[in-house]
Image: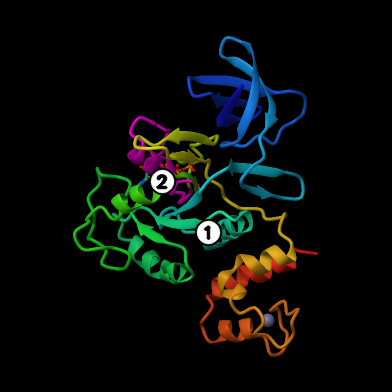
Amino acid sequence: MPGRVVAVHGHHFLVDDGEGVIECVTRGKKGGVACGDNVTFASTSAGKGVIEAIAPRRNLLYRSDEFRSKLLAANVDQAAIVVAAVPAFNEELLIRCLVACEVAEIPALIVLNKADLPETEALARALAPYAELGYPLLLVSAREDVAMAEPLRVPPYQEGSPRGQLAELDQCLSDKTTVFVGASGVGKSTLLNRLVPDANATTGEISLALDAGKHTTTHARLFRLPSGAGALIDSPGMQEFGLKHLNLASLMAAFPEIHSRHGQCRFYNCRHLKEPGCAVLEAAKNGAIMASRMKVYHWLLAGIK
Ligand SMILES: Nc1nc2c(ncn2[C@@H]2O[C@H](COP(=O)(O)OP(=O)(O)OP(=O)(O)O)[C@@H](O)[C@H]2O)c(=O)[nH]1
Ligand SMILES: [Mg+2]
Ligand SMILES: [Zn+2]
């Protein structure tokens, strides 16, 4: 019987067959089942089954280190990378998430949450160049119960939408399968609860004293949007995003600002490291490419051999 994987708990999977949710395991050491996978399963007893096969995937978002891959979501239309000023913003993590999306050919948007916090203003300004790179940037507040310190007047804030762009986000999500990814504590599950009121995903209080998020979501879970055919996948927060699966060609293509300068360097096989006549390094020097992005590009390049 066919179904879609809607939750992954270690080696247990919840499969939605359209009528209900079946608790499944895999036969043998298949592993590698992702939230969002289309599978066929055989039922073993009431409400239980075994996954027999995974249908070919449209795409797969995952992270990887030397030892293993961690699958985040399969068959999605887009990824919403959720960021916030509190706990402390991690730009390297954002860049790595964007690279992973580019490699998987999954369109990415950036959701800057916690618009109600005064710290968010500076971050909104710092993120503006990402919108210029082509990643839609939305500024929202997932919490209706907290007062806005002062409406932020930086783009993408719009006059007359005091809670930020929740309506725009809602529109972006409609009829699509979207995966929420990002650091722990940025508000992915709180946003999900706003958008899917009966999701009741566990949200956690962050320890402000430690300025560190607590991992409250422990497994990926797919929820249907109340309107239409869309779905949202909530995923556990991460501290780092391993990209061991990158190769040179995919790295070169993963940075739009580097890719668009292809062919402008003196050497056709330029790696934009310290070659003379490099158009990318020149652009970085005069500020046309963000220093933070260039730094992460060089780190990722150093990791490929
Ligand atoms: N002030 C403010 N707090 C928020 C907002 N959104 C979420 N929070 C708070 O941030 C904390 C973390 O929220 P979660 O939704 O659990 O964060 P998460 O990204 O799901 O975290 P993980 O599950 O660990 O990945 C909670 O205390 C939320 O109440 C917001 O828009 N404004
Ligand atoms: Mg969560
Ligand atoms: Zn170059």
Precedes in sequence: disc 2 or disc 1? 1
Label 2 SS = loop
In the image, what residue occupies the spot 52% across and 75% down?
Answer: 290
In the image, what residue occupies the spot 77% across and 24% down?
Answer: 28
Q: Is mark 2 within 8 Å of ligand 1?
A: yes
163 left or right of 34 in image: left
Q: Is residue 281 above or below residue 170?
A: below
**Image spot of residue 203 (x, y percent):** 41, 37
Q: Which amino acid type is shown beneath numbered disc 2?
A: Gly
- SS majority, magenta: loop
In the image, what residue occupies the spot 73% across and 85% down?
Answer: 275
The quadrant in which residue 218 appears is top right
Indicate which disc residue 187 carries: 2
Q: Quadrant of the C terminus?
A: bottom right
- Name the residue carrying label 1: 94
Label 1 SS = helix
**Image spot of residue 288 (x, y percent):** 51, 81
Q: Is residue 244 above or below residue 201?
A: below
In the rendered image, residue 288 lying in the magenta stretch gets the answer: no
Q: Which residues are magenta?
A: 184-212
In the rendered image, residue 188 lying in the magenta stretch gets the answer: yes
Indicate which disc residue 60 carries: none
Q: How many C-alpha atoms fall within 10 Å of the one at disc 1: few (<14), some, or many (≥20)?
A: many
Tell me, what colour scheme is on the image?
A: rainbow
Q: Is mark 1 within 8 Å of ligand 1?
A: no
**Image spot of residue 170 (x, y percent):** 34, 47
Q: Which amino acid type is shown beneath numbered disc 1?
A: Leu
Q: Residue furthest left?
A: 160
Q: Quadrant of the N terminus?
A: top right
Q: Residue furthest right?
A: 305
**Image spot of residue 167 (x, y percent):** 29, 50
The quadrant in which residue 22 appears is top right
